[in-house]
Structure formats: structure tokens, C-alpha cells
Amino acid sequence: MRERTSRLIRPLLMLLSGKVSPNQLTLLGLVTSTASFLSFWYDYIVIGAILVLVTGFFDLLDGALARHTGEGSKWGAFLDSLVDRYTEIIIIAGISKFSTLGYLAITGSLLVSYSRSRAELEGVKCDVGLGSRPTRLLILGIVSPLPWGRDLSLIMVSIVAHSTALYRMFHTWSSLKNKRSSVVPMS
């Protein structure tokens, strides 16, 4: 899917090369997610939803531009990962206005990324499950402007995120059960 998407956006990447850095696109996603928060908070639902999709597009572009230009770095990867968490929290907080559903969606979203990171520290490739960040952003951007869409989008994100985190837990357990290693629990 990454290759197909890269082919589609290649003309845009060529246009952006040398004019904007991948890290600038990452930070622009933070700005658009904040604008999305404000739009949802003040009940401009359609604008908020569009800004969620724009945020997701910047997230797609930053990594693609880094690969295209060879400007990828460990710092850029770290910044992108951290800003991804912030943008999702900001967007969900705006949609939910800090409700219980928002809390469930945020915690599920964070556990999806944490479960992957922690599994990969143990040597297990763990990009399994349907609840990846692009999927969650699509749900938020498409479902939230529908009638009853705010709550429905948060319920959908909660379900897909928590089920993905649990699936990643099972995947990691099954991958590690045959390996002999001394695993030190991390808190």
C-alpha cells in the first residue's frame, strides 16, 4: 500500500522537495490537528472533520518526503512518532469534549502504538491489526460529521483500537512463547 500511495503522491513530493522539510510537514500536522480541535470544540463539525483528514495527509506526506529526499533521520522518526500521538489526542479531545468515550478512544489509540513499540523491543514485528493510525484518522474524519457521528466515531475508534492492542498482545505472546529468553518486565 505504501508503494501505491507513493506513486500517487510522487508529483507532489517532487514539488515539495527542497521547499519544505519532512519535519516541517510533521509540525504542520500538529497545527492542523489543533485547528481541528477548535473546530470540533465550537461545533464546526465538518470543518473539524476535514482538518482531521488534512492532518492525516500531512502525516502521510512527511514520511514519504523523508524517504523521497533521503532526509530521514532518527530525530525525524522520533518527532513524527511523538507528534502523531499528540495530534490524535488533540483531535479526540476536540471531538469528545473530554468525555468518557474520548478517554476510551485516546487510551486505545495510545495502546496500539505502545504495544507495537514494546513488542518490537522484544524482537517481534508487530504491525498487525486493523486499528492503525491511518484507519483511526479515517474513522474520525469520515464518521464524526454524520448525525450522531461524534459519539459513533469515538465508539468505533475505541473498539478498533482496543481490539488491535489486544490482538497485538496475543500476536506477541504467540511469537515469543517458543523463544527462550529472560524477559525483564518494564513498567
Image: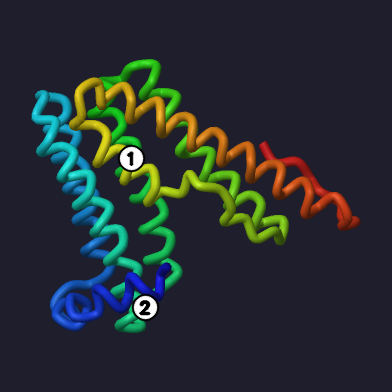
- In the picture, measured across the screen, residue 74 lies left or right of residue 58, that is right
Q: Position of residue 42 (x, y in %)?
A: 10, 24
Residue 93 against residue 49 in the figure, above or below: above
- Amino acid at pointer 2: Arg
Q: Position of residue 60 (x, y in %)?
A: 31, 62
Foreground pick, 141 / 108: 141
Quarter-of-image position of residue 51: top left
Q: Position of residue 34 (x, y in %)?
A: 19, 40
The C terminus is located in which quarter? top right
Q: Position of residue 59 (x, y in %)?
A: 30, 58
Residue 67, numbered circle: 2
Instruction: Please tell me which residue is depicted at 41% across the width and 34% down the height of the picture.
Output: 157
Residue 6, numbered circle: none
- In the picture, measured across the screen, residue 97 lies left or right of residue 108, that is left
The N terminus is located in which quarter? bottom left
Foreground pick, 48 / 97: 48
Q: Alpha carbon of mark 2 to alpha carbon of mark 1: how far?
A: 27 Å
For numbered disc 2, what is the local secondary structure?
helix
- Amino acid at pointer 1: Ile
Instruction: Please tell me which residue is depicted at 32% across the width and 44% down the height of the picture.
Output: 137
**Residue annotated with mark 1:** 139
